[in-house]
Every structure is written in C-alpha cells, then in structure tokens.
C-alpha cells in the first residue's frame, strides 16, 4: 500500500519490478484500467512526467551491499532514463488512440515551468526510494497537479510514465542472505507503468508492462560471472536495459490498443 500522495499510483509498476526481479518469471499486474470514452484520435494528451527509480536493481557484491546508487558504477539509472525518454515519447506519439502534444511545447509552457514539482521520492510502507526524472521534466505525484496541468495546457488528459530497471540473476550454486555464489547469469529487466488523468483529476488509464531480455537479444544481454564474491556489472548492462525498456513501452502501448479495441488483455504477464 502506498502512503502519502495518491499520485504514487505512478510507482506501482516500478515497485513491482523492484520486488519481483529475480523472484519469478511471471508478474500479476492486472488488466489495463482504461476509460475508453476519454480517448479518441481527436483527443489531445500531454506527457508531463517521466521518472524512474534511481537505483538499477540487481545483485550486488558483498562490498557494495550497503552503498548508495551513486557509489556503485552504473547503478544510477539517470543515463538509462535519458536514453529511454525519446523512445517513450515516440511510442506514445504513434498511438492512434489520441493526439500527443509535442514534448517541446509541454516542457516550455509557462504553466508547466511554474508548477512546483513534488518531492522526488516514493514511499511504500517503511521503504523510501529516490526517483530520477528525465531531462527537462518535473516529477509529479498528486492527482490535483495532473488535473491542473491538463486544464492549463488545454488538453483532454495528461500522462505520467514510471520505469524500473533491474537485473534478473540466474544460476549461482549457493545463496546466502540474498547473495549467490558460483556461476551466475544476468539479464536486464524493465517494468514500465503509465497513468493518465483528465481535467477532473480522475484516472482514465493505468497499466503496467514487464519485459526481460532473452538470450539472442542484441548487445550481450546475458553475462556469465564466475567470481564468487562479485555482483552484477551494472555498466555492462546499460545498452540492453534501454533496449528492453523500449520493448516494455511497446508492450504497454499494445495492451492499451488491444483494450481500446475490446480485446481481452491478460492480468498476468511473463517477463520473457
């Protein structure tokens, strides 16, 4: 259960990725929640927030267990988010279900620049996690602010996107307190969530998509580590994390399009 601002719905997707990465090849995300009447080719929407959990989730070495994301090479997701940002916008822009206002117009609008952003953290029970925000964007979590932006930008709805990047660990002969020892394999995972609000602050679209890189995907998505006490090399996985993030965004939009077309969309997703 999220505490604090109800706009934390943006982060349910990210926290799913955080908690499930490495635990199961399946995730129960629920079916897309879509108000079909709120969308249409002539409806205008704006993306007002693109954010990610700050930490690239994955197995760490014993020496890095208690370090922050800024102290571990490649563990801060900011560069991943910046590279995924244009892919997110491009995917939403291609949707036949609404017309997307150009990103540059949103980010330079007086209403957007003047509205104070929310604290860049998310809280779930006793866990607090820092957030990264894509280039030139602001972080919003309060439905009232989304509603205000929808009105002042003159659009039918506004969209927030949240991403979690992680590494699934396979193999490992022995597991002690979350650290595995022995030969291991790693693959990048991405969990992408979207939430859209109308001018009344009502949720009109909410969904999550999860993907995990597979052997054969480009850019060395699987690496074998034979050093017993080392964790994942996060920097090595940056290219594949961005690639699988883009695939998760495409899946998110495919689920949205299928829902708008009246097709049944699964509540359970496979990471593969």
Image (tube, helix red, strand yellow):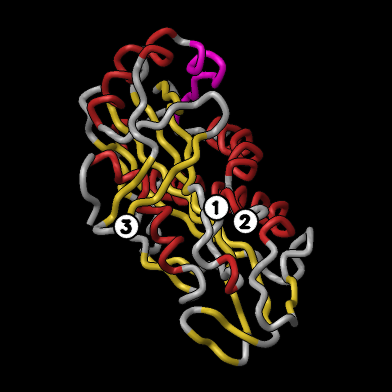
Is 151 above or below relative to 165? above
Determine the CA span between mark 1 and mark 3: 16 Å
The answer to whether residue 262 of the structure is visible from this angle is no
Say if mark 1 contacts mark 2, CB within 8 Å. yes
Is 248 above or below relative to 116? below
Determine the CA span between mark 3 and mark 2: 20 Å
Quarter of the image where the C terminus is located: bottom right
Q: Which residue appears at 67% of the width and 87% of the height? A: 182
- Residue 72: image tag: 2
Q: Which residue appears at 50% of the width and 59% of the height? A: 210
Q: Name the residue under label 1.
A: 69
Q: Name the residue under label 3.
A: 127
In this orientation, which residue lies closer to the viewer: 263 or 2?
2
Q: Which residue appears at 41% of the width and 32% of the height? A: 139
Determine the CA span between mark 1 and mark 2: 6 Å
Residue extent of the magenta highlight: 98-108
Quarter of the image where the N terminus is located: bottom left
The x and y percentages for residue 200 are 20, 25
């Amino acid at each position: 259960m999220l505490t604090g601002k109800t706009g934390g719905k943006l982060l349910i997707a990210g926290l799913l990725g955080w908690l499930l990465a490495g635990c199961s090849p399946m995730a129960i995300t629920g079916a897309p929640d879509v108000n079909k009447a709120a969308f249409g080719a002539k409806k205008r929407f704006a993306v007002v927030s693109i954010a990610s959990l700050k930490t690239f989730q994955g197995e760490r070495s014993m020496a890095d267990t208690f370090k922050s994301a800024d102290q571990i090479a490649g563990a801060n997701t900011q560069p991943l988010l910046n590279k995924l940002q244009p892919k997110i916008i491009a995917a939403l822009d291609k949707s036949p279900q609404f017309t997307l206002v150009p990103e540059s117009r949103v980010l330079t609008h007086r209403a957007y620049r003047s509205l104070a952003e929310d604290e860049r953290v998310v809280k779930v029970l006793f866990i607090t996690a820092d957030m990264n925000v894509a280039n030139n964007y602001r972080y919003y979590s309060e439905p009232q602010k989304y509603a205000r932006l929808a009105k002042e930008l003159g659009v039918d709805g506004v969209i927030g996107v949240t991403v979690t990047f992680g590494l699934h660990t396979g193999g490992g002969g022995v597991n002690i307190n979350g650290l595995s020892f022995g030969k291991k394999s790693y693959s990048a995972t991405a969990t992408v969530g979207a939430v859209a609000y109308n001018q009344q602050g009502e949720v009109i679209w909410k969904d999550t998509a999860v993907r995990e890189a597979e052997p054969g995907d480009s850019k060395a998505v699987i690496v074998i580590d034979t050093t017993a006490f080392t964790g994942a090399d996060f920097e090595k996985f940056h290219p594949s994390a961005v690639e699988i993030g883009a695939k998760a965004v495409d899946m998110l939009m495919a689920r949205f399009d299928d829902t708008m077309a009246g097709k049944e969309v699964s509540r359970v997703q496979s990471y593969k």
